[in-house]
Image (cartoon, rainbow, N blue to C red):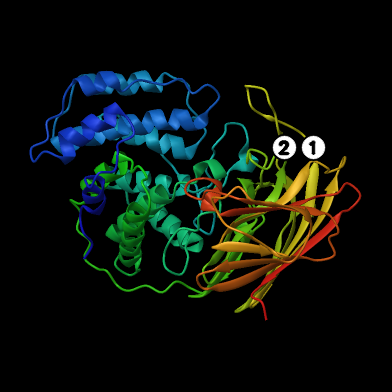
Amino acid sequence: MLNACCLQSLYCRGIQPSSPLFEQIASQFFFQSQPIFPEDLLEECLWEEPLFSEEKMTENWKRLLALNVLCDLADVHPLKLPAKVRFFERRPWNQSSQYVRSLVALNHAFARMPIPEVTPQVLASGAALIDICEYTPWLSLPYTPHHFEFGIFLAVLSLLGKRQDLQDIVLRMAHWQLNTLSVEGKPLSGLFVREKDTKTLQHQCLSYLLFRSAALFTQETPFAAIAEAAIRGIQQCVEEREERMEPLWALLEKWLAQYQILSCAPFQLSEQIHDSSTALVGYRSSMQHIVCTLHGGYTGLGALRQGGIEIVSYGPQYLPLGECEGFGIEGNALSDHGMRRSTIEWQRHSFVLKGCVRLVDQPSSSLSGGGKFRGIWLDVVQEFKKPHFYLKTTFLGLDGWESVAFSFFVKAVCCKVGSQVLYPRTFERYEGEAQLLLLEGEGGQLELCSLGFMGRMQIIPLVGDNHFWGADFLVAYFMMPEERHYQWHISAPI
């Protein structure tokens, strides 16, 4: 049986709140047996202007949702709360995004206001496309953490409104979300995750809440056991690093605790991952996983683990290497047709994923954001034949790709190139001709080798944590304007 208040107990162990507002929420709710809602909390919940940032807009609504949930748990209903919701609703927000619409509707529901219509749409596989930017439907993906959050919001809405149709959608989303987990039930840190959304603890908390919510709706699946596995990941994150836990997730856990989970069957995730609607294919076992895709939005082409070594994300990237605004591919089911149509051939221990992808626009230095259209495309073949992985790319474009690298973000204990040994969190790096790279981890070794590449490469030690998908090294191969074809081979050394 799941602990009803895992997140609350971990939050109370000393995770520092992220703002004075949430500090008051913690002191008024978590640390008191009889919570009292202070009216001045409403005055502190202000709308912060997004300034071209979709993330800031959703953070506004999530702060307000935390207050709404707190009011419901304390069984108080301030008269000013509906007025606060209406004030937020008059500010600009992405009304075309089903993810944001569910967040706004949930605020209405907790404030006991008429609930705006929510009719979520998912792909045949159960994946929900999330609009993170207005007017860019080709960038809509089942992003982490947004896909987790969307499922959680719909689950709570379904319980508040007793809507069976939303429960069915949540179950379909949860079934698809299994594709993004390791065999241990942990979210893959780089799959459909933008670099700026790298938050390991947050992703674990959201995985726990989504599968806990799904477990309320059915006893025929191992969702409760997966939620229990997420708890172990959360505890590990709390012990290993000082990372803030958002009180909203602890508050929602407390609210969900009124609904009992009756079953906690053991789980064993399928070895095979296959979803053509998101150009996703993979294999996972206790010793390794390799998951590849050709859909993205400032995200990579996949993730790989062998023993204790991980390549958490990889893909094309504009220089400079220290910034990931120019990393990744773009495109989804809307653009996956014609010359861009992806194909998947798969068997139990092998697969081939082929297709044409576009490199994201080159970042602009202007304050308004956006980017410079370069028209760089890649024909990509990703082939896995256990235990070997081959990545083949052919660059296509309107002009050259001299300012482009192909980057691998790696978790490893150390990295050996020639006679040089590099360690994370150090200033020593390698820059020179491309050579065989030996990655070492607690569970063995992994070779990364460029085939037929005569150019230059750079290896940069990183600090890990919540930067660059938690990677310890950045391995970058600099593309040459006169060369179109590049390929790599990754496997354990013989």
* Residue located 33% across and 43% down the image: 245
* Dot placed on the residue nearer the N-terminal end, 2 or 1: 2
The amino acid beneath tag 2 is Asp
Q: Position of residue 374 (x, y in %)?
A: 79, 37
Crowding near the residue tagged with mark 1, few <14, some 14–19, many ≥20 C-alpha atoms within 10 Å: some
Percent position of residue 459, x then y: 68, 53
Residue located 68% across and 43% down the image:
321
- The residue labelled by disc 1 is 374
The x and y percentages for residue 99 are 46, 40
| Quadrant (top left, top right, bottom left, bottom right) of the N terminus | bottom left
Image position of 76 with respect to 432: above or below: above
Q: How many marks?
A: 2
Mark 2 vs 1: CB contact within 8 A: yes
Disc 2 and disc 1: Cα gap in Å? 6 Å
Q: 88 or 393, which is in the foreground? A: 393
Q: Residue furthest right?
A: 482
Query: From this viewpoint, is residue 336 visible?
Result: no
Q: For numbered disc 2, what is the local secondary structure?
A: loop
| Label 1: which secondary element | loop
- Which of the 4 quarters of the picture holds residue 18? top left
Q: Inspect the image, locate mark 1, and give the three-letter code of the amino acid beneath it.
A: Arg
Q: Which mark is residue 361?
A: 2
* 112 or 270: nearer the viewer: 270
Which x, y percent locates residue 491?
A: 66, 73
* Dot 2 crowding, Cα within 10 Å, few <14, some 14–19, many 20+: many
Q: Residue at x 25, y 44 (%)?
A: 14
Q: Is residue 234 visible?
A: yes
